[in-house]
Image (cartoon, rainbow, N blue to C red):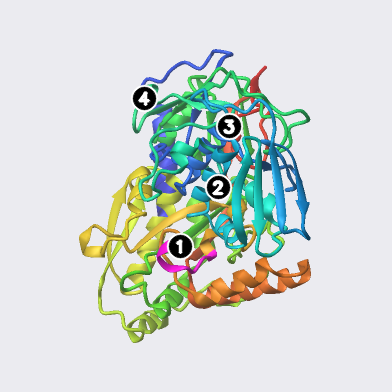
Amino acid sequence: MHRRQLIRTVTAAAIAAGLARPSVLRAASATTLTFVPYADLALVDPLASALVTRNHVLMVWDTLFALDESWTPRHQMLAGHTVESDGLTWTLTLRDGLWFHDGTPVLGRDVVASLRRWATRDPFGQALMAATDELSAKDDKTVIFRLKHPFPLLPAALAKPTNLVPAIMPERLANRPTEKLLNEVVGSGPFRFLPDERVSGARNVYAKFDKYVPRDGVPSFCAGPRIAHFDRVVWQTTPDPATQAAALREGEVDWVEQPQMDLVPSLKSDQGLKVEVLETAGLIGMLRMNQLYPPFDNPAIRRAVLRAVNQREFMTAVAGESDGATINDHVGFFAPTSAYASNAGMDTFSANPDLESLKKDIIAAGYKGEKVVFMGSGDVPRITAICLVGADLLRRLGMNVEYATLDWGTIVQRAFRQNPIDQGGWSILGTFTGGLDWDNPACSSALRGDGKTANDGWARSPKLESLRDAWLRAPDATTQKALAAEIQRQAFTDVPMVPLGLYDQPAAFRADLTGMQKGLNLFTGVRRV
């Protein structure tokens, strides 16, 4: 609470005093949209698991299917599809007019290579490929899945709009080794990336792709026609919250993705601005533990840390108690908006955890004072908040915490490394994910337990994997719901990560912008009036 009071004082003083701010480009043009992302775009590959990368991917790339407002998969890059042989053969036909930004046509073999690449990392893609006997391009327009067993979720997998997006790219890029992330950005979506205008840590620029042909129909979330109304979109990285707010008020930028929550009330009072929650499934905080090395390779220690968490304390540090902020401090391993959210295992949490008792449990579990390297963000306020609370909690539990304050781009890159702690590795980090990422067992990377091939943290849980496989093969929704409850109970035992609660993060943008889609930060459909 003291930290939030300090933030209020500092930011209010900064605005009142008119502190000198870095110069930013005036955004008064009808053809240019200037956007302030929550962090710098450090990684441009669709295989990078960061929300800022996801927003970039949804601008540049397209997908075969796309979700509409009812979360129903619709054809996007496809003209149509057929299902034969009792659900074992899926034939997908590409629509006309698909071109990559490098001037080459989108072909069936590009699709095959792209999906194979995506499936090396994405949990939904891994499930789909495990059910696939053969994936091939019959010709330039036709892709065929021959399955080992029915997989009715195939359209949903290929419509996934969150990390990791099943983005279609040229075969020559998709076939490169996935151990090294791509720096070349070539998609077929409504905007193309301009690498020559990129300034690392400061600026990324996109241009309308003139050869993009929107499909017919009415826009609905990610589905339907994706129409770019701006010739250029400039991402202006501006870490300081007060600078962001002042630039928005003065019209130097058009859209701030995540204004600091303490500044939201003053932004709401400005008649020239709109403040709305665009990511309507919320943002879920979590602690990711490196489970390859001590002390978090020990599930008993992970369980003790989880039982020590008071979700309200974490979310209050981010969003405060008032100011219209929406906090949910009853979050398990599925998003509250998910059909699979339940109370299974939720009695593990306590409003008043006994830290002294848990400290003894950690020692009894075998903790020997090993150094805990906590990677804490210094430039994304919401992540900084949960990292500071998390590091303080670990210290109160008797852990030897070394807190490393890093910019978010560095954390995202370092999180991929599996080095030992004394060789530049890490022990724990705080982060957020979108509620859509935790919608079901198929798409949630947080519920994978496949060791070194799992997401950052590399959790290993054969039981979680077995339950997930059963969910994927479940014959009906009732069985799926029961299995999802079992998955959550098992997650409370194995602790692949620690959920910290959810809050709704508003975006702030100029009042002359219209066409904002709800659900995610989408740049198509947005125009100036």
Residue holding disc 3: 106
Of helix, strand and loop, which one carries label 4? loop
Residue 181 in the image: x percent, y percent? 38, 44
Of helix, strand and loop, which one carries label 3? loop
The residue mark sitting in front, 1 or 4, is: 1
Q: Amino acid at mark 2?
A: Leu
Of callouts 4 and 2, the N-terminal one: 4
464 or 184, which is in the foreground? 184
**How would you rate the neighbour count of disc 2 (Cα within 10 Å): few for under 14, some for 14-19, many for 20 or more?**
many
Residue holding disc 2: 115
Q: Going by the image, does 4 lie left or right of 373?
A: right
Q: Is residue 493 above or below residue 73?
A: below
Q: CA distance from mark 3 to mark 4?
A: 44 Å
Q: Going by the image, does 69 lie left or right of 145?
A: right
Residue 287 in the image: x percent, y percent? 44, 62
90 or 63, which is in the foreground? 90
At x 61% / y 43%, what residue is drawn?
137
Q: Which region of the structure is painted magenta?
A: 447-454
Residue 38 appears anywhere in the view: no
Residue holding disc 4: 21
Magenta run includes residue 319: no
Of helix, strand and loop, which one carries label 1? loop
Magenta run includes residue 449: yes
Q: CA distance from mark 4 to mark 2?
A: 44 Å
The residue lying furthest to the bottom in this view is 364
Q: Is residue 256 above or below residue 128?
A: above
Of callouts 1 and 4, the N-terminal one: 4
The residue lying furthest to the left in this view is 422
Q: Amino acid at mark 3?
A: Val
